[in-house]
Amino acid sequence: MATPAILHTERLSLRAPQVRDAVQIAERIGVRDVAWNLGRAPYPYALSDAEDFIERAVQNWADDKACVFMLEHAKEGVIGCCGLDRHTDEIWEIGYWVGQPWWGQGFISEAASEVMRWAEQDHGIKQFVSGHFKDNPASGRVLEKLGFEPVGTAKHFGLARGSEHLAMRYTRGAPPEMALRTASH
């Protein structure tokens, strides 16, 4: 998977992050309620954070550690992100976010479904884990639409939150203990 792919859905193009995306990424994640739901995003979220994210994403594609797709809307530009992080050779974690103006419109379900289709059909990946902070049930509904099953809770550090909070953990094809052990969305 070291070569970034470009995927398409009905409403979105999914592609690797580019330097030109930094301003929109910073604007979208820079809203407290968006950053609050992510494990690795600080708040406040600065342009330099977006630039660092892009640099890491590009390197992770090259190192086959992660596949990060920006959700690009034809009229709105970058509205979110969906990606897969490698935990083991067989187990990958899916994570995602979308800017607040696009919440509740099905963009994450649409994008994540396509990313998982690509991973399964083009790369033979069959084991996935994921999760969300307990106070973000909308993310759980997305995971259930994708065929994930809840397997329990684990403490997860949220950089924007500045502390550990309970995260609901899910699996699709992976052993439940892996979902509980690898909370890193």
Image (cartoon, rainbow, N blue to C red):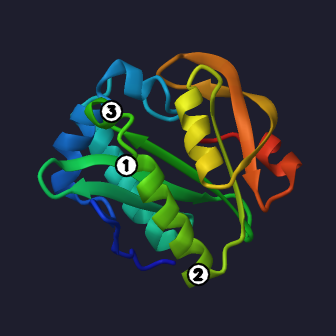
Q: Spatial distance from mark 3 to mark 2, Cα to Cα?
A: 31 Å
Residue 173 image point, x, y percent: 78, 62
The earlier-in-sequence mark between 1 and 3 is: 3
Q: Secondary structure at mark 3?
A: helix
In this view, 43 is above or below 150? above
Estimate the x, y position of residue 84 in percent, counting from the top left. 55, 59
Query: Dot 1: few (<14), some (14–19), or many (≥20) neighbours within 10 Å?
Result: many
Mark yes or no: residue 23 visible: yes
Residue under circle 2?
A: 121
Q: Do callouts 3 and 2 mark residues in contact (Cβ within 8 Å)?
A: no
Nearest the viewer among 69 and 61 is 69
Which SS class for mark 1? helix
Which one is earlier in the sequence, the residue at label 3 or at label 2?
A: 3
Give above or below for 32 relative to 1: above
Quadrant of the image occupied by residue 184: top right
Q: CA distance from mark 1 to mark 3?
A: 16 Å
Which residue is at 67% across, 73% downward?
Answer: 125
Residue bearing mark 1: 107
Question: Dividing the picture into quarters, in which one does residue 7 lie?
Answer: bottom left
Residue 97 image offset from top left, x and y in percent = 42, 41
Label 1 or label 3, whichever lies nearer to me, is 1
Furthest-left residue in this view: 75
Left or right: 69 in relation to 117: left
Classify the position of the C terminus by image quarter: top right
Question: Can residue 64 be seen in this snapshot?
Answer: no
Residue at the (77%, 30%) spot, across then down:
154
**Mark linked to residue 182:** none
Q: Which residue is mark 3?
A: 29
Judged from the image, the secondary structure of the residue bearing numbered disc 2 is: helix
Q: Position of residue 137 (x, y in %)?
A: 59, 28
